[in-house]
Image (cartoon, rainbow, N blue to C red):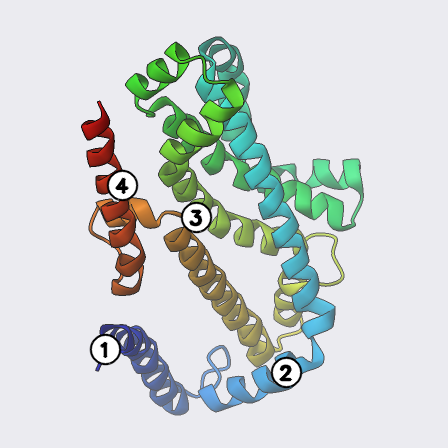
Amino acid sequence: MSRRVLGFLLELALPAVLLVGYGLWAAQAQSFYFPPLGEIAQYFRELWLFERVGSDLVPSLLRVSAGYLASVVIGVTLGLALGMFRTLRTAAEPVVEFLRALPAPALIPFSLLLFGSGDSSKIFVIVLGAVWPILLNTIDGVRGVDAQQLDMARAYHIPLGARVLRIILPGAAPRIFAGMRTSLAIAIILMVVSEMVASSEGLGYFVLEQQRSFAIPEMWTGIILLGLLGYVLNWLFQRVERRALAWHFGLKGLSSPTEAKTVRPARRRARSATHSTDGEV
């Protein structure tokens, strides 16, 4: 059995044990708030394959995608600027710290006044909460770039754009991805919170409406779907991160066997290029 299959089975083992344990307990408890597992599965199949997909799941996915992508663009762009220029960072620090301290859900009334009850207000709330981990990690990543490489680039009069693309962004990429991973979970949370206020569609609206009407099994299907959504998005993010930072995980000895096949030849090419350069010198 390969290591990948074994790892996949290990990931499934604990959720399967928890589901079986809950099913056995709920069948005996007869609790109104904890319905039997079979009843939840039946409602889940009726609601989400595919009755409520277009009316609730798709709008939520579009909102969280738009808010998260906007957070990445704003956080990385501002983080590069603030990390590279100390004067700008010093001037912006009080404003950044003030805005970062504001809880994004507290700004939902302001966003409703500013944008109304449409998608713009919900995306605005997601950006307000998800942008900070990306921004702060980008600033730290840029400040942690090797100063000798930057000094050498300046000595050879390499343009600023090339320095950003070839030295600063690759050097800060591990910290940027760490911030992006944290922001992904925050974006999902704020998507749910924003949809619970002045909304008529979305997963947050669905869960709240089912709770208000005491439709407990339906409410649990929404909660389970949110958990599955977070798991799938995080899994996709890890695949992208592993691919984009293959060199970083390879240096730390964390790459998978498949990735190692791509990293090791790259290392050999880099070493051979270094030896040939030394020979020329």
Residue 102 seen in render? no
Circles 2, 3 touching at the beta carbon (< 8 Å): no
CA distance for labels 1 and 2: 33 Å
Residue 204 seen in render? yes
Q: Residue at x 60, y 78 (%)?
A: 218
Residue 2: assigned label: 1
Disc 1 on helix, strand or loop? loop
Q: Counting residues from the N terminus, which is met first, the one under dot 1 or under dot 2?
A: 1
Q: Is residue 278 above or below residue 178?
A: above
Q: Which residue is mark 3?
A: 181
CA distance for labels 4 and 3: 30 Å
Judging depth in this view, the residue of 70 and 206 nearest the camera is 70
Q: What amino acid is at disc 2? A: Leu
Residue depth check, mark 3 versus mark 1: number of the one nearer the observer = 1
Location of the C terminus by quadrant is top left
Q: What amino acid is at disc 4? A: Ala
